[in-house]
């Protein structure tokens, strides 16, 4: 039963992280239009405010547009929670790769892979 899961206090870092993902999504998704999906504007705000470091502090609209287009699997112009989680998964994988790279090789590689 989802309600009982959500009403419990998280007992581990991973559970806290999952609740933070949900809370963060809804913090931005509720600002305009559909309360349960991110519009382009809401996604941009979320990316800049919450993921500015990972996205290189990129303030250009092209990067946001690209993320939006990549994420919007069903092409309805909105990012729903499932689509958002796919982004978070991909970013987490990228961070993990970066972390492993740093561990095994201190020097940055020339011309990273795409
Ligand atoms: Ca919205
Ligand atoms: Ca969508």
Image (tube, rainbow, N blue to C red):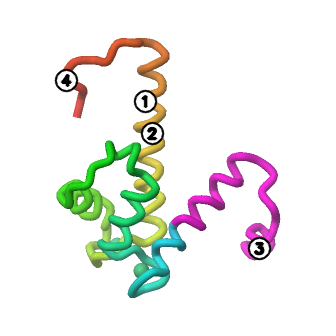
Q: Position of residue 103 (x, y in %)?
A: 49, 16
Q: Which residues are magenta?
A: 1-24
Choose the circle earlier in sequence order: 3 or 1. Answer: 3
In the visual, does 43 lie left or right of 77?
A: right
Pick whichever of labels 2 and 4 is earlier in the sequence. 2
Q: Are marks 3 and 2 in contact (CB under 8 Å)?
A: no
How much space separates mark 4 and mark 1, taking CA atoms?
Answer: 15 Å
Most foreground residue, 81 or 102: 102
Q: Which numbered disc flags the more N-terminal residue, 3 or 2?
A: 3
| First reached walking from the N terminus: tag 4 or tag 1 | 1
Q: Which residue is mark 3?
A: 1
Would you call the spot at circle 1 few (<14 residues within 10 Å), some (14-19), or many (20 or more)?
few
Relative vertical location of residue 56 with respect to residue 78 in this rendering, above or below: above
* Marked residue nearer the N-terminal end (3 or 4): 3
Q: Is residue 12 above or below residue 33?
A: above
- Measure the alpha-carbon separation of dots 3 and 2: 29 Å
Residue visible at 26% across and 59% down in the picture: 64
Q: Which residue is mark 2?
A: 93
- State the separation of the CA atoms marked 2 and 4: 19 Å
Between the residue at mark 3 and the residue at mark 4, the CA separation in whole angstroms equals 48 Å
């Amino acid at each position: 039963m989802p309600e009982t899961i959500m009403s419990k206090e998280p007992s581990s870092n991973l559970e806290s992280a999952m609740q933070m993902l949900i809370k963060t999504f809804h913090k931005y998704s509720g600002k305009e239009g559909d309360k349960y999906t991110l519009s382009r504007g809401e996604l941009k705000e979320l990316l800049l405010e919450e993921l500015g470091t990972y996205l290189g502090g990129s303030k250009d609209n092209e990067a946001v547009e690209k993320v939006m287009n990549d994420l919007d699997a069903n092409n309805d112009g909105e990012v729903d929670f499932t689509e958002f989680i796919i982004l978070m998964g991909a970013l987490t994988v990228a961070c993990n790769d970066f972390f492993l790279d740093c561990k095994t090789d201190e020097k940055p590689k020339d011309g990273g892979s795409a």
